[in-house]
Image (spheres, rainbow, N blue to C red):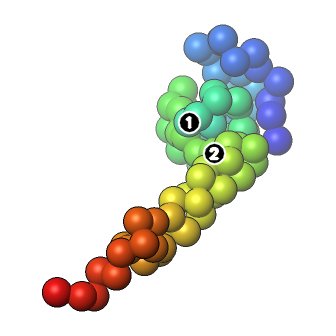
Amino acid sequence: MGVGMPEESANPPASEPEESGELMYVRCSVCGEWLGVKPGGLHLISHGLCPACQERELKRLMEELARRRKPWGSAAGNDSNTD
């Protein structure tokens, strides 16, 4: 749910949070897309992941987990249980 701010902009979008004083802006910590607002301090920025970056990160983590679960000797044809 982007707020329509260009990625190169360093300033949060001007909108309702300034009126209430109880909301902070949320931005993707990877690509910088504005994600919306959540309860917090005025003019503060919190970070999360947008859906696209979250999907990429999950895929990367699943590949890393699969790589780590491979038996030690399987890549070189060695049996790691022998002395």
User: Residue 51 vs residue 25: left or right?
Assistant: right
Q: Locate the N terminus by quadrant.
A: top right
- The image position of residue 75, as x and y in percent, is 45, 66
Q: Which of 22/50 is in front?
A: 50
- The image position of residue 48, as x and y in percent, is 59, 45
Q: Kindly identify the residue that appears in the image at 59 percent across and 63 percent down.
A: 62
Label drawn at residue 29: 1
- The image position of residue 34, as x and y in percent, is 70, 31
Q: Do residues under tags 2 and 1 come within 8 Å of each other at their CB atoms?
A: yes
Type of the residue with mark 2: Leu
Q: Which of the two discs, 2 and 1, labels the residue nearer the N terminus?
A: 1
Q: Kindly identify the residue that appears in the image at 64 percent across and 21 percent down.
A: 12
Residue 9 seen in this snapshot:
yes
Q: Is mark 1 on a helix, strand or loop?
A: loop
Relative to 3, does residue 53 appear above or below in the rendering? Answer: below
Q: Provide the residue designation for mark 2.
A: 49
Q: Kindly identify the residue that appears in the image at 80 percent across and 30 percent down.
A: 3
Number of other residues with Cα within 10 Å of mark 2, as a class: few under 14, some 14 to 19, many 20 or more: some
Residue 68 seen in this snapshot:
no
Q: Kindly identify the residue that appears in the image at 64 percent across and 29 percent down.
A: 31
Q: Which of 82/28 is in front?
A: 82
Type of the residue with mark 1: Ser
